[in-house]
Image: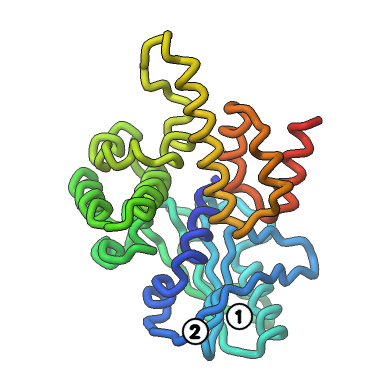
């Protein structure tokens, strides 16, 4: 499930202004993504984002599952202390639960001990009004997780909004992000039926994460050419996700990725969203080469 949390982290860091508007109701002049581990003891921060504006830090944590080695409430207190010590500005902390659950953790908004009480915000996506997410590029992929009485109506409306995106590459990526997150709530057949199949089929991310190797059914005589084409598409997909996740990648690492066959490229595509840093990618490549 970590890939869903990591995808939301990617969205928050790609469209930070949209998340600031949503959660702080502010129009900041500047936004800085804080690339800090804040590590005294090892805490995995795969799904954690820190956005700093002029006078505040927004700490976002996305949760798909409720299992955690350290209680979420204690982790929020821990981050609050570290952020306060380091930056000395007010901090708003928000835990966003993606998948519907009745577990009390999703309804807990504070850490309480004998001498300490620490409060933070909790957002349960299944309670949110979908209208807020529809006309907002950065938030649109989260729309399938919002409140609805009719799954077909919600997904159809989302498809219409995706189709309005003028830039082709942005439309492809948004469609892919949306369908990935929709998989947390809806059956694949329903997603395929209602999220504009012609748009989704253009998406490399869709083909290699959601289809999971499902064949398109061409004639056997064309398979070799198809495999070469699929390998190029898989490589394009991996390089796109790596750039989205980590920015500019060293050419020596790109050359190693280019040497992978189609099956390993597909495996890499699934693994990238679980990587915390480029060192994870290098470790993965070393394992494949060995």
Is 285 on the left or on the right of 3, as rendered? right
Tell me the CA gap for discs 1 and 2: 32 Å
Q: Nearer the viewer, mark 1 or mark 2?
A: 2
> Residue 178: where, in percent of width, then height?
37, 50
> Residue 255: where, in percent of width, then height?
69, 41
Quadrant position of residue 71: bottom right
> Residue 23: where, in percent of width, then height?
41, 75
Residue at 47% x, 19% y is 225
- Choose the circle earlier in sequence order: 1 or 2: 2
Look at mark 1 in the image and give the residue it sits on.
117
Tell me if residue 258 comes above or below residue 148 in the rendering: above
Tell me if residue 85 comes above or below residue 265 in the rendering: below
Q: Residue furthest top?
A: 221
Residue at 58% x, 28% y is 262
Q: How many marks?
A: 2
Dot 2 lies on which element?
Answer: loop
Taking depth in this image into account, of 246 and 167 the one nearest to the observer is 167
Numbered label attached to residue 30: 2
> Residue 76: where, in percent of width, then height?
61, 71
Q: Check disc 1: other Cα within 10 Å, few if <14, some if 14-19, many if 20+.
A: few
Dot 1 lies on which element?
Answer: strand
Q: Which quarter of the rendering shows the C terminus?
A: top right
Taking depth in this image into account, of 18 and 144 the one nearest to the observer is 18
Q: Check disc 2: other Cα within 10 Å, few if <14, some if 14-19, many if 20+.
A: few
Taking depth in this image into account, of 94 and 237 the one nearest to the observer is 237
Q: Which quarter of the rendering shows the N terminus?
A: top right
Tell me if residue 239 comes above or below residue 98 in the rendering: above
Residue at 77% x, 35% y is 287
Residue at 48% x, 54% y is 103
- Asked if marks 1 and 2 touch (Cβ < 8 Å), the reply is no
Q: Is residue 161 visible?
A: yes
Q: Is residue 119 visible?
A: no
């Amino acid at each position: 499930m970590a890939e869903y949390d990591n995808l939301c982290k990617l969205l928050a860091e790609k469209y930070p202004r949209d998340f600031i508007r949503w959660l702080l109701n502010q129009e900041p002049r500047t936004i800085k993504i804080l690339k800090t581990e804040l590590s005294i003891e090892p805490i995995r921060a795969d799904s954690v984002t820190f956005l700093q504006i002029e006078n505040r830090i927004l700490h976002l944590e996305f949760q798909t599952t409720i299992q955690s080695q350290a209680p979420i409430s204690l982790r929020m207190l821990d981050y609050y202390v570290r952020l306060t010590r380091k930056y000395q500005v007010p901090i708003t902390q928000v835990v966003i639960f993606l998948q519907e659950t009745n577990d009390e953790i999703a309804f807990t908004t504070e850490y309480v001990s004998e001498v300490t009480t620490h409060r933070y915000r909790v957002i349960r996506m299944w309670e949110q009004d979908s209208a807020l997410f529809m006309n907002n590029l950065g938030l649109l992929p989260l729309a399938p997780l919002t409140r609805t009485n009719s799954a077909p109506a919600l997904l159809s409306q989302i498809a219409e909004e995706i189709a309005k995106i003028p830039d082709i590459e942005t439309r492809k990526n948004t469609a892919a992000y949306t369908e990935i997150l929709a998989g947390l709530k809806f059956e694949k057949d329903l997603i395929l039926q209602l999220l504009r199949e012609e748009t989704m089929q253009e998406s490399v991310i869709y083909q290699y994460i959601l289809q999971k190797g499902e064949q398109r059914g061409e004639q056997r005589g064309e398979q070799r050419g198809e495999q070469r084409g699929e390998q190029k598409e898989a490589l394009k997909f991996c390089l796109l996700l790596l750039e989205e996740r980590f920015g500019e990648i060293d050419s020596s690492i790109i050359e190693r990725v280019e040497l992978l066959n189609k099956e390993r490229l597909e495996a890499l595509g699934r693994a990238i969203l679980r990587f915390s840093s480029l060192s994870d990618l290098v470790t993965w490549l070393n394992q494949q080469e060995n």
